[in-house]
């Protein structure tokens, strides 16, 4: 199996319904997204707003001077 062969990747993922990408936020709380295996094989990207990873346990955000005011998406 070669790394870039889509057919061997499809065989590897056979029987798997979803692909999940999880990363911890600033507090260690797992955040993530799920996509179908078909979407993964098609090369779709999962995106997550950067602010989600900076949100504190009580729902607030740290001052923007620590991370900037841009809340762009992260590609997972």
Image (cartoon, rainbow, N blue to C red):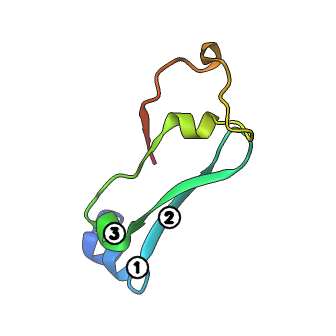
The structure residue drawn at horizontal position 73% and vertical position 46%, both measured from the top left corner, is 28
Rendered image quadrant of residue 7: bottom left
Quadrant location, the N terminus: bottom left
Q: Is residue 49 visible?
A: yes
To which quarter of the image does residue 3 belong? bottom left
Q: Is residue 54 above or below residue 20?
A: above
**Label 1 to label 3: alpha-carbon separation:** 11 Å
Q: Nearer the viewer, mark 1 or mark 3?
A: 1
Q: Which mark is residue 2?
A: 3
Q: Is 45 located above or below residue 63 in the figure?
A: below
Give residue 55's position: percent from left, percent from top: 64, 36
Query: What residue lies at 25% left-to-right and 64% top-to-bottom?
Result: 42
72 or 13: which is nearer to us? 72
Q: Earlier in the sequence, mark 1 or mark 3?
A: 3
Label 2 sits on residue: 20
Q: Pinpoint residue 24: horizontal percent, then vertical percent.
A: 66, 48
Q: Residue at x 46, y 22 (%)?
A: 70
């Amino acid at each position: 199996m070669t790394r870039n062969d889509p057919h061997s990747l499809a065989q590897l993922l056979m029987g798997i319904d979803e692909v999940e990408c999880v990363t911890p936020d600033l507090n260690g709380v797992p955040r993530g997204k799920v996509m179908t295996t078909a979407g993964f094989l098609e090369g779709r990207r999962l995106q997550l707003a950067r602010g989600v990873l900076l949100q504190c346990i009580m729902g607030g955000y740290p001052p923007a001077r620590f991370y900037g005011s841009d809340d762009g998406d992260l590609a997972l």
